[in-house]
Amino acid sequence: MRDTATFMILGNICTRNCAFCSVNKGKPLGIDSDEPKRVATAVKDMGLKYVVITSPTRDDLSDGGAAIFAETVREIKKISDNIKVELLVPDFQGNKEAIDKVVLSGCDVLGHNLETAAALYPFVRKGADYDRSLNLLNYIKERDSGILTKSSIMLGLGETVEEIQLLMNDLRTVKCDLFAAGQYLSPSIYTYKVKEYIVPETFDAIEKYAYEIGFLASKCAPYVRSSYLADSFISSKK
């Protein structure tokens, strides 16, 4: 047992309509102010040492749910400051006050996924913006240069190797520290179709390139996902 787990907070309904995702779309319910304490209780009961916290996008909330993210971190850290907490956050529509809340929460890793190459955003990530996501990661480093930032992508959506290398260079330009890439697998017959199954050698080459351009840690393989062996990114930093 790795003593790690991922929790999704802020409900199960997303306000965006990304073509690759099967999370329910629509009008979310209100927030549960007790959720941070309940997550912390679960962390304690499970004896976890590394926790990933994520959520659907909540554009219906003025801060995108940032306050609940931050409070969840604080409640977990009350148990023990030795418990590492990684946040995987939406873009908060670029709201810097919201981003400040998660930066100052005390989390150990702060992640935001680019998901795919910029050219595919109009087809795959409707409602998202490539530059806005990069600016979010850049702003995190401006506010706290010591915080570890992370981003993940999916391959097989129709991108080229050159487009992925450009994306990776863009991430390093905003000083992103940790990088992951995995094979996209369509979660239903109604979502975006897989365009290509990427061979292991391509994943190996992308991971090698990640280290060459300065990422501190990277995992690139077919079954890698955002929270895949998340705790090992810190321990495997080069």
Image: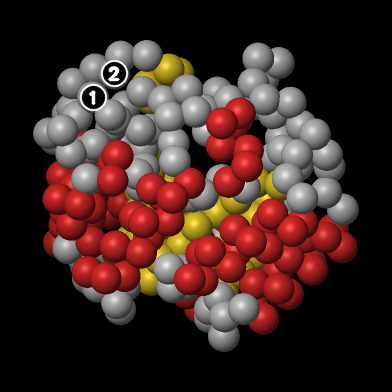
Residue 59 position, x and y percent, is 28, 29
- Using the image, tell me which numbered label, if any, was put on residue 60: 1
> Residue at the spot x=31%, y=27% of the render?
11
How many angstroms separate mark 2 from mark 1 (CA)?
Answer: 8 Å
Whether residue 61 is visible here, answered yes or no, is yes
Q: Earlier in the sequence, mark 2 or mark 1?
A: 2
93 shown above or below 79: above
The residue wearing badge 2 is 28
> Residue at the spot x=64%, y=61% of the render?
166
> Residue at the spot x=30%, y=78% of the render?
146
Count of numbered labels shown in the rendering: 2
Question: Which residue type does callout 2 highlight?
Answer: Pro
2 shown above or below 127: below
Residue 227 position, x and y percent, is 51, 53
Question: Which residue type does callout 1 highlight?
Answer: Asp
Question: Which mark lies nearer to you, 2 or 1?
Answer: 1
Q: Secondary structure at mark 1?
A: loop
Front position in the image: 84 or 168: 168
> Residue at the spot x=20%, y=52% of the render?
96
Q: Is residue 215 left or right of residue 177?
A: right
Front position in the image: 121 or 177: 121
Instruction: Name the quadrant of the N terminus.
Output: bottom right
Q: Residues within 10 Å of mark 2 (few under 14, many from 20)?
A: some
Front position in the image: 79 or 98: 98
Do residues under tags 2 and 1 come within 8 Å of each other at their CB atoms? yes
Q: Farthest bottom residue?
A: 238
Residue 30 position, x and y percent, is 18, 21
Residue 185 position, x and y percent, is 71, 35
Q: Secondary structure at mark 2?
A: loop
- Using the image, tell me which numbered label, if any, was put on residue 51: none
Whether residue 225 is visible here, answered yes or no, is no
